[in-house]
Image (tube, coloured by chain):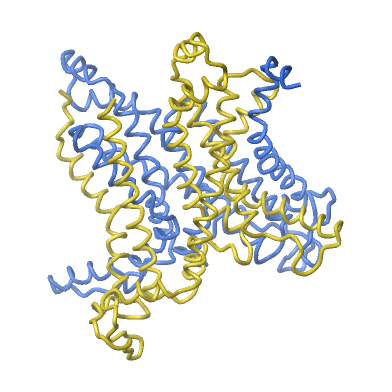
Amino acid sequence: MLQRLRENKSAQGTLLALPTMFWMFALLIIPLLLTLIISFGRRSPDGDVIYTFTLDNYARLLGYSTDCDNGASACFNSLYLQILWRSISLAFNTTFWVILLAYPLAYFIARANPKRRNMFLFLVLIPLWTNFVIRVYAWMMLLRKEGAINIVIGSIASLFDIPFQPLEMLYTPGAVLIGMVYEFLPFMILPIFTSLEKIDTSLYEAAADLGANGIKTFLRVTLPLSMPGVVAGTILVFIPVMGTFIVSDILGGRQVILVGNLIQRQFLDARDPTFGSAASLILMIMTLIVTYFYTRKFGFGEEIVVA
Amino acid sequence: MNPFRRHPIIQVATILVYIFLYAPIVVLILYSFNASRTNVTFEGFIPRVSERVEMQGSMVQASPCGAFHWFCELSKNDDVIEAAGNTLTIAFTSTLISTIIGTMAALALQRYEFKLKPFSQVSLYIPIVIPEIVMGIGILTLFSQLFGLLNGALGLTGDSRLSLGLGTVIVSHIAFSVPFVTLVVQARLQGFDKSYEEAAMDLGANEWTTFRRVTFPMILPGILSGGLLAFTLSLDDFVITFFTNGPGSTTLPIYVYGLLRKIITPQVNALSTVWILTVFIAVLLLQVLQSREQKQT
């Protein structure tokens, strides 16, 4: 039998890939299918799942409500649609700000003296490798009413004798945006840096020889050639922002509820896994649609693996 | 030369972004030396005394550990030590398994043709393109339904019942790290010069010896960087662990998250400081090793 295996290349390949395929199948495909099945189910009074086929959970997400003020049996409630919209616009906002902050830094590092380039990259890796939860906590300390930002602004104000009321920054949508930008900034810097570094410097010389000025060279040479990095970075930022619940939980308090918070509460507090499953499928479909159109327009950069 | 090289806007923006990246970390570290227990405002450093800790209200007046009071408290905190142990156990076990099976899969995908190859290749991208929470609740549902069935079928009760714990966390961590290991090793195999292997075979080595003496040493850097990636992913993971952990399998990120929702003392900052310093030293070592390797080649 061993002899036959030695000659059968296809069986060898299958055997080598088998453990990984098992894991992918058992812990990715099956859970996704289960989520799909359960999203059509109903919640039993003690929080278990009753397997049946109903679209109630999806109807509820899209605004169908049976809990109405005026005694009507059904009405429209935009609560969950608002949550979905908030999540998707926050994800776009975060991506925009992250690109805006990451690009100059990546550009600077890519054009820095090669001897110092590693040190600049190293400085980007430290915050990236510092734990996610710890980074949110750091912003909690900065944004609090008694926090460092208010202290700094307050002392500047007192220098000029300007009356200053500490700003309420924590537990606002702005705090969540800052936290998200901070969390995911390194994921944009690294791929943009990788694609900028690959650009052949002779292209700049050619552009200059042909009479292009600095801005023109940037717009016509640098920017298009660094797009794969921006695309890879966007995927690495947009998808996790859509599903993250810690940042909004810690920095948004009860004020900013995102899809991630909604799903988490259905599984842990509200104990309605059927509704939570439906919400998480909607979340997955939304991210897949955005990713699909985005990569179809700009292509799928290989920089994604580098980061 | 590139006209934008020393553009002042780029330089100012760079400095501002670095400040943005590091200001929170500096504040976090500073507050781990705070004399105030409530940790709302910074009330100065703690003086050292030789006797016991002196408290007044929410202020620590003096401590045998001096300014490092909260680090001493941290080292006496059994919950933290247990969580740190769990975090490392999970990271080491899941890294070991995912590195081995991920490397095997990379070899299969790069070197062999088989029926399920397209499926396996595509499935590797799933964890990258779906939000982690979707995977987390899916795995939670799988375990709870499976354990419910098995506990009922086998008539398990009380402590012998199957439940979430270290095992479920490790299995789940393997699931999200395997694709990354496979993709990294695969990238390494793509640039592989097959003539070395052919030379070994010509010199009479069999397939296994060729793999052991030629292929493996050549792809080892790829395997190590894949393993390192798996290790950091596991150490850093919050979401998947959040949904798959049970009593006795709390990890450090989960522990910190729990504290953030209660009263926060500078102990959390001390823990964060230790974490940041560990990361700093680890990344520094890696950079030194990497630049050495580059110099050799």
Q: Position of residue A27 (x, y in %)?
A: 67, 44
Q: Position of residue A179 (x, y in %)?
A: 40, 56
Chain in blue on the image: A
In front: B232, or B213?
B213
In front: B19, or B117?
B117
Q: Position of residue B273 (x, y in %)?
A: 34, 63
Task: Tell me which residue sits at (35%, 34%) in the image.
Answer: A192
Q: Is residue B127 visible?
A: yes
Q: Quadrant of residue A17?
A: top right
Chain B painted colour: yellow
Q: Quadrant of residue B263?
A: bottom left
Farthest residue toward the front?
B204
Farthest residue toward the top?
B202
Farthest residue toward the left?
A160
Task: Tell me which residue sits at (27%, 85%) in the image.
Answer: B62
Q: Please state, as top left, top right, bottom left or bottom right, where the N terminus of chain B lies in the image.
A: top left
In front: B25, or A271?
B25
Q: Position of residue B218 (x, y in %)?
A: 43, 25
A56 on left or right of A153: right
In front: A217, or B91?
B91
Is A115 located above or below residue A49 in the figure?
above
A14 on left or right of B147: left
Q: How many labels sit on residues? A: 0
Is A23 located above or below residue A246 in the figure?
above
Q: Is residue A83 visible?
A: no
Q: Please state, as top left, top right, bottom left or bottom right, where the C terminus of chain B lies in the image.
A: top left
